[in-house]
Image (cartoon, helix red, strand yellow):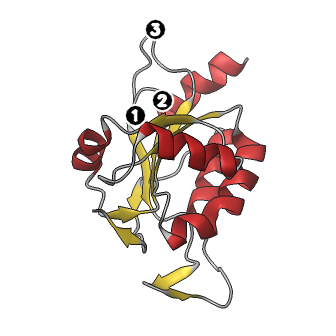
Amino acid sequence: MRQLCLLILLFNFGCSFVAGQNTKAQLLLFWSETCPNCIFYGPEIRRLQGKYIETVEWIFIFPNLTSTDSTAHTYILKNKLQGKIEVARAADYVQKYKIEVTPEVVLLDPAGALLYAGRIDNSYEKIGRRRFKTTETELADRLQKLADYQSFPYIRTRSVGCFLH
């Protein structure tokens, strides 16, 4: 039944399923060990992982030149996050998905098609300024729709965070 639902999901997005490809959606999280916005979003990412760890492959990409495999692994362990870590090929991902800041996320369907790109939510209205109350939760909304096998249009939102260095 799950495979049938996955095929229906892929059909809704206009993608074709190729045997041997990922069976999970992928969430690319462009992250930095030193960015205050990434640190702020740690608890929200842990909460989302608690709900969607089985349906989404989580990949943390550390694109800053100061990031190393060691610093990235230490950060992930210290903050009790789960997922793969990519440092060596980070620049390729940044170029491919036109990433400008951390944190920024890219959600891909199992065939690799873009489902969503941008911010986690609207907690930050501009650099260094958080909203009193978060009113839009784009990433959580899309992960839930994905888990419920509901289609949704691709959009890209503007992320607010730390510039890549």
Do the CB atoms of the residues marked 1 and 2 lie less than 8 Å apart? yes
Residue at position x 64%, y 19% in the image = 4
Residue at position x 68%, y 86% in the image = 133
Residue matched to label 2 = 11
Circle 2 or circle 3, nearest the eye: 3
Q: Residue 14 carries which label?
A: 1
Outermost residue to the top: 19
Depth order, front residue of 1/104: 104
Residue 22 point in image, percent of width and height: 50, 20
Does any portion of residue 70 appear in the rendered image? yes
Compute the Cα span from label 1 to label 3.
16 Å
Does any portion of residue 28 appear in the rendered image? no
Question: In terms of image quadrants, where is residue 47?
Answer: bottom right
Q: In this view, does 87 lie to the left or right of 38?
A: left
Amino acid beneath label 3: Ala
Q: Residue 19 carries which label?
A: 3
Position of the N terminus, as image quadrant, is top right
Residue at position x 70%, y 37% in the image = 53
Compute the Cα span from label 1 to label 2.
5 Å
How dense is the environment of label 1, judged by Cα within 10 Å: few (below 14), some, or many (20 and up)? few
Residue 43 point in image, percent of width and height: 71, 61
Chain-order first, disc 1 or disc 3? 1
Amino acid beneath label 1: Gly
Compute the Cα span from label 2 to label 3.
15 Å
Amino acid beneath label 2: Phe
Dot 1: element: loop
Q: Is residue 38 left or right of residue 46?
A: left
Outermost residue to the front: 70
Residue 11 point in image, percent of width and height: 48, 29
Circle 1 or circle 3, nearest the eye: 3
